[in-house]
């Protein structure tokens, strides 16, 4: 059992949890919690190693995961409760975490539904939007400059496995413009055209801006049209995650009808 915070694996986990630079240098991230670990196994991702507490050996969901990893040759190390608490990014550690190679799913060559996120800075919002985009059948999510790191632990948890199934890339605006060769719609409060008037059954891209800073000038340059979600009088805007869900599932509805 690992009981020291000076252990190399423990040091690595803590660095990956707290520093984006460490995640980039190691090309790895921490996946914490039974549910997210299950998603990683279903996506056939093999961890570099796993850490677990004694209680996980008899847990009905964690024990099978440990068995799968051990059979694949993954080093699974039992740690003390204090060590797990130090390694965890949550207030109530689940008792199981792994270090995975950072997933890099290739961007599709001919995407039909692209989501572009501009200067979105709240990790929980980003994770929720990634999960929503996955559920709605988006082909890819592109993160413009100023958007929070997609491998942030809070983004990982809120994404609930989207990182393992959905191509996600942080790109410059020039690279985004090169990638998105279809009509681009920018969601902004007060626009005259409703999101329901757009033909989402054709290849298209949607830009959602951060709530604090709003869309960047380059977002307006790239957009062919500005659209909005009609709301009751006196309501200025919606949370970025909610707005994304409303528009993406309208696109899904139209595509299913088509």
Image (cartoon, grey):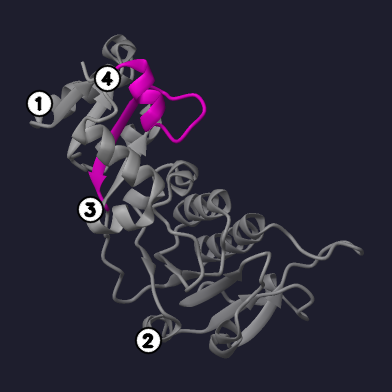
Q: Cβ–Cβ below 8 Å for labels 2 and 4?
A: no
Q: Earlier in the sequence, mark 3 or mark 2?
A: 3
Q: Earlier in the sequence, mark 1 or mark 3?
A: 3
Residue 152 image position (x, y, % from top left): 43, 50
In the picture, residue 134 is in which quadrant? bottom left
In terms of secondary structure, where does tag 2 sit? Answer: helix
Residue at horizontal 59 percent and vertical 69 percent from the top: 208
Magenta segment: 80-102
Q: Residue at label 3?
A: 26
Q: Is residue 103 visible?
A: yes
Question: Does residue 222 appear left or right of residue 20 in this picture?
Answer: right
Q: Cβ–Cβ below 8 Å for labels 4 and 3?
A: no
Eye-nearest disc, 1 or 3: 3
- Camera-side residue: 82 or 77? 82
Eye-nearest disc, 3 or 2: 3
Residue 79, disc: 4
């Amino acid at each position: 059992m690992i009981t020291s915070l000076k252990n190399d694996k423990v040091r690595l986990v803590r660095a990956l949890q707290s520093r984006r630079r460490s995640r980039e240098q190691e090309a790895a991230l921490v996946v914490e919690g039974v549910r997210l670990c299950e998603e990683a196994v279903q996506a056939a991702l093999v961890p570099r190693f796993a850490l677990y507490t004694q209680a996980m050996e008899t847990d009905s969901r964690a024990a099978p995961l440990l068995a799968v990893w051990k059979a694949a040759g993954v080093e699974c190390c039992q740690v003390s409760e204090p060590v797990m608490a130090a390694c965890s990014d949550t207030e109530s550690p689940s008792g199981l975490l792994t270090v995975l190679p950072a997933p890099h799913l290739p961007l599709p060559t001919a995407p039909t539904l692209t989501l572009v996120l501009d200067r979105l800075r709240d990790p929980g919002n980003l994770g929720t939007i990634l999960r929503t985009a996955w559920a709605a059948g988006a082909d890819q999510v592109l993160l413009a400059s100023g958007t929070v790191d997609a491998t942030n632990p809070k983004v990982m948890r809120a994404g609930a496995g989207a990182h393992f199934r959905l191509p996600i890339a942080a790109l410059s605006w020039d690279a985004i413009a090169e990638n998105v060769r279809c009509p681009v719609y920018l969601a902004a409060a007060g626009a005259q055209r409703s999101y329901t008037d757009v033909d989402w059954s054709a290849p298209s891209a949607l830009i959602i801006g951060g709530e604090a800073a709003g869309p960047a000038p380059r977002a307006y340059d790239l957009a062919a049209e500005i659209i909005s979600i009609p709301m009751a009088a006196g309501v200025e805007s919606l949370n970025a995650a909610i707005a994304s869900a409303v528009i993406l599932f309208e696109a899904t509805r139209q595509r299913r009808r088509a």
